[in-house]
Amino acid sequence: MPVRLGLALPQYGRFADGEALVTVAREAEARGFASLWVGDRLLTPLDPADRYPGGDGTIPPAHRTFLDPFAVLSTAAAVTSRVRLGTSALNANWYPPALLARSLTTIDRLSGGRLDVGLGLGWSSDEYAAAGVPWRGRAALFDATLDALEAVWRDDPVSVTGPRWDIAPSHILPKPAQRPRPPVYLAGFSPAALARVGRRADGWLAASVPPPVLMGMWDTVRESAEQSGRDPDGVRVVVRANPIVVESPAGAAPPRSGTLEQLAEHLGALAGAGVHEIFLDLQHTATDPLHLLDLAESLRKSSGL
């Protein structure tokens, strides 16, 4: 099957703007892109306790301004009718699961069943502290949150006992438009995170890395799926690519930066390695919404996706 190509929605930095959001959402659908995605950032500490997981470890200055992912995705749902709408990735532990399930169910219902739920643990202990959630024990809390989401979406009445919350036997309606629930994708690169994807997710939210590195981690996902009695071919791979486009190849090396030709070649290599979907986050390199759309169009045509 052909690789699906999507875009990250305007959400942060110079693109944290309602008009930019509506323009890109509508035009991306009109141009035939398959999906639109949002991320989840809360703050940029002046003296971070943790290194940013990318580049030189410095948090991108553009992340100092970041719109709420639920509001952004809801706006995109209201001005489109066909594209899939995804989160890559919500920091699931920040949200009580009953509230998280309600927000996601609402988007799925109002969009006519177009939501892909991407969830992760996050990387910043500063953000956890600001959200009032303990950093210690976050992996166990994540698994409990996933269990609670499954129950809220599946059961009526719902009854869940969790490490930080309890849901008394209750009706929690409506259920999502997609049954039994929206597709759930999980982020992460540690062996434990990759094993969790294979054990319980519909797909893996990966990053744009050299294909041999990506496929090495994908083997861990597939092995976990097989060991859990699941069909590994039923688990999808979605790659976020957030490159910087440069004019000259000197010193530039995909996947982090490169010319349009270099980046297109990298995207084609990812497609050839067997990923199912790639979405482009061009907010670090585009100057305005139309430039963003045109860059995405050029990468699509040059890569053959």
Image (spheres, grey):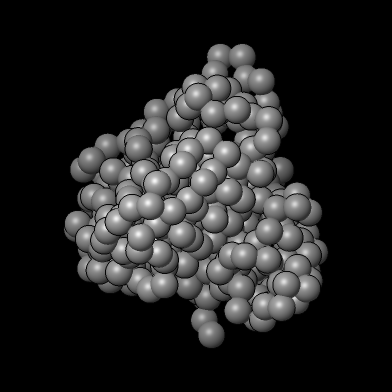
Q: Which quadrant of the structure image shows residue 10?
A: top left
- Residue positioned most to the top: 46
Residue drawn at point x = 67 percent, y = 78 percent: 230
In the picture provided, is 19 more to the left or to the right than 61?
Answer: left
Residue 100 against residue 279 in the figure, above or below: above
Q: Where is residue 161 in the image (x, y as percent from the top left)?
A: 52, 46
Identify the residue at horizontal 19%, vertical 57% (top origin).
Answer: 78
Residue at the extreme front:
169
Q: Is residue 15 left or right of residue 216?
A: left
Query: Residue 154: where, in percent of width, then height?
Result: 42, 66
Residue at position x 35%, y 60% in the image: 157
Say left or right for 176 vs 284. Answer: left
Q: Position of residue 26 (x, y in %)?
A: 23, 59
Residue 55's place in the image compared with 209, above or below, is above
From the top left corner, tell me how far across and down residue 173 is, in percent: 27, 58
Hey, which quadrant is residue 108 in on the image?
bottom left
Task: Work out whether residue 45 or residue 171 is closer to the camera in this orientation and state it.
Answer: 171
What's the residue at 26%, 61% (across, down)? 174
Q: Name, please, the residue furthest toward the bottom.
A: 1
17 lies above or below 156:
above
Comparing 70 with 101, the one in front is 101
**One can see residue 71 in this view:** yes
Say which quarter of the image contains residue 27.
Answer: bottom left
Count of all numbered marks drawn on residues in the image: 0
Of residues 21 and 127, the one drawn nearer to the viewer in this rendering: 127
- Residue 299 visible in the snapshot: no
